[in-house]
Amino acid sequence: MLCKVLICCSCVFILGGCVYKEEPVLEVDSGWKSSVTQPVVTRKVVIKETSSIPAEWVPPSYLEKRWTAIVIHHSATSYGNAAIFDKWHKESNNWNGIGYDFVIGNGNDSPDGKVEVTYRWREQQTGAHCGGTLNNWANKEAIGICLVGNFNNREPSERQMQSLAKLVRFLQKRYSINKSRIFGHKDTPGARPTECPGSMFSMARLKSML
C-alpha cells in the first residue's frame, strides 16, 4: 500500500495533519432565601448550556472526562473531512481511527465551518493528535481540534474561525479551561517540533474572539 507523506520543515504531515506513527496510549447549586414580605429565589449555575449548542458536542455523562486543555491543529491539506482523515489514519498509521476529537471543514469535502464530532469525542478516548514524549500528556488531557486547510499557505476561513470560537467557548465553560491552556500544536508543552497549525493561523485572534 502506498502512503502519501508531506514533509514540511521539521514536521512530517501524514495524510491529514501533524501526526505520528505511535498512537498514544453539570453542576447546579440552587437554594432560596426568604424575607418577611416574600421569598427570594437565587440560583447559581456553574455550567450553562443553551439550545444553540449541538447535542452531539455533549459527551455521554457516564464516559465524560475532566479535560484540562485544548490543542488546535490544521490538516496541512487543502481538503478533507473526519471520514477521510479517519481512513488515512487507519491505513497509514495503523490506528483505531482519526486522532482528533473534532474536525472543522473548509468547504472541500465538508461544508465551510461545519464542526464534525469524531468517535474519539463520543467515546471520550485518549487522542492521537499531539506527538512527542511517550504517553504525551496532551493526548490524555487535551481536546484535539483540527481545521481543514494548510495554514502555512492561507488563513482559515471566517466561518471556520467563528465555528472554532463557538466550540472552544463551549469547551472552556464546560471544563473550566483558561485561555492560557489553549495551545497551537507547535506551542504545546512536550510536543515535538512542528509548524502546526501553520504560520498564518493566529492564536491571538482566536483568543480575542473568546
Image (cartoon, grey):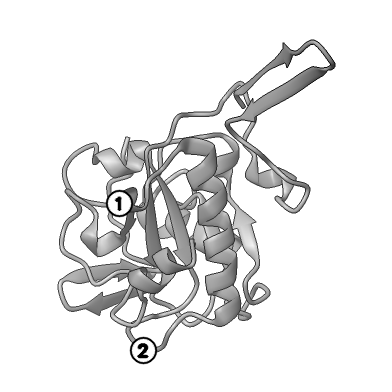
Q: In which quarter of the image is the N terminus?
A: bottom left
Along the line of sight, which residue is nearer the eye, 32 or 124?
32
Residue 120 visible here = no
Q: Residues within 10 Å of mark 2 (few under 14, many from 20)?
A: few
Q: Is residue 78 above or below residue 63?
A: below
The Cα–Cα distance between marks 1 and 2, rounded to whole angstroms, is 26 Å
Q: Nearer the viewer, mark 1 or mark 2?
A: 1
Q: In which quarter of the image is residue 140?
A: top left
For badge 1, the amino acid type reads Ser
Q: What element carries label 1?
A: helix
Residue 180 - label: 1
Q: Residue 185 location in percent, x, y?
A: 29, 60
Considering only order in the chain, which callout, 2 or 1, is on the residue closer to the N terminus? 2
Local crowd at mark 1 within 10 Å, few (<14), some, or many (≥20)?
few
Q: Is residue 27 left or right of 9 when viewed as pictured?
A: right
State if disc 2 and disc 1 touch (CB < 8 Å).
no
Residue 179 image offset from top left, x and y in percent = 36, 53
The image quarter containing residue 163 is bottom right
Amino acid at dot 2: Asn
Residue positioned most to the right: 38
Q: What residue is disc 2 on?
A: 153
